Amino acid sequence: MDALLEVRNVSKRFGAVEALKDVSVSLAPGEVLGVVGDNGAGKSTLMKVISGAHPPDSGELRLAGQPASFASPRAARQAGIEMIYQDLALADHLDVGANIFLGREPLRRLAGVVPVIDDATVRAEVVALLGRIESHIPDPETRVLALSGGQRQAVAIARALYWKAKVVIMDEPTAALAAIESRNVLRMARSLARDGVGILFIDHNLLEVLEVCDRVAVMYRGSKVYECRASETSQDELVRYMTGFSVQGAAVPA
């Protein structure tokens, strides 16, 4: 299958610190790729390069086979790359629909002249979206402030789905969630993938990574040191690479 997203030989420095060293990864449509590593391994920097927050110093990105360069996260989002941050970046005092459509609300004309938000369309679209990802939010007019952590994740995922994201980056999506809500988030990630979206899944919980991901890439000191199918590795093997040792016990080059 052709790659949806390709990161080719990307490097990034911050002064004397080489945060990324010649990193290459690819992501296919409908695939969930886990990206794991200890703190400081380069995961966040890689995601910020992909999402337009940091320009790479060298290397290139390709989206759907075409060279891609993003001057900002807004440009990346317009190209179809959606980042779901750990803190979700939702507007707590707005309702579910307002968060999904924020700044891009459908309009109708009052008396054929005055543009106003089309609340009926917003509600219908939100109900359909939440149904597609099987989210348990009983009322789409609920303010986000009143939602649980898992429900807030559902709002962010629904927003990405509605705006036809090609690639969704999920950054620690189950952090601080109860077990049942974590299960729901994993299910929603797979639901997005079934719609053909490519998912980059960053998580410290390796059991979750092995359950939800198709492949796993391990970062260590700014380099990608290991990549395999999730079904062909184990938590112990991933930890060996994350901590700098290969399966044979030899140190991974820094």
Image (tube, rainbow, N blue to C red):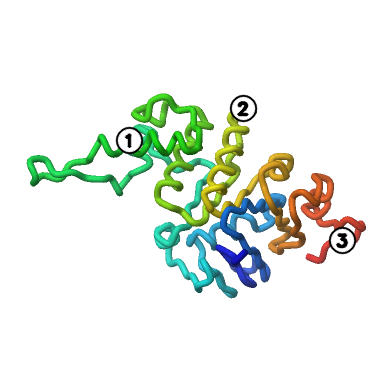
Query: Mark 2 against mark 1, which lies toward the viewer?
Result: 1
Query: Mark 3 against mark 2, which lies toward the viewer?
Result: 2
Cα gap from disc 3 to disc 1, whole angstroms: 55 Å
Q: Residue at x 63, y 48 (%)?
A: 202
The mark nearer the N terminus, 3 or 1, is: 1
129 vs 137: above or below = below
Horizontal and vertical percent position of residue 113: 8, 46
Name the amino acid, label 2: Ile
42 vs 181: above or below = below
The residue that disc 3 covers is 251
Whether residue 40 sits left or right of residue 62 in the image: it is right
Cα gap from disc 2 to disc 1, whole angstroms: 27 Å
Q: Which mark is residue 124?
A: 1
Name the amino acid, label 3: Ala
Q: Is residue 13 visible?
A: no
Horizontal and vertical percent position of residue 90: 42, 40
Q: Residue at x 76, y 60 (%)?
A: 226
In which quadrant of the rendered image does the C terminus lie? bottom right
The mark nearer the N terminus, 2 or 1, is: 1
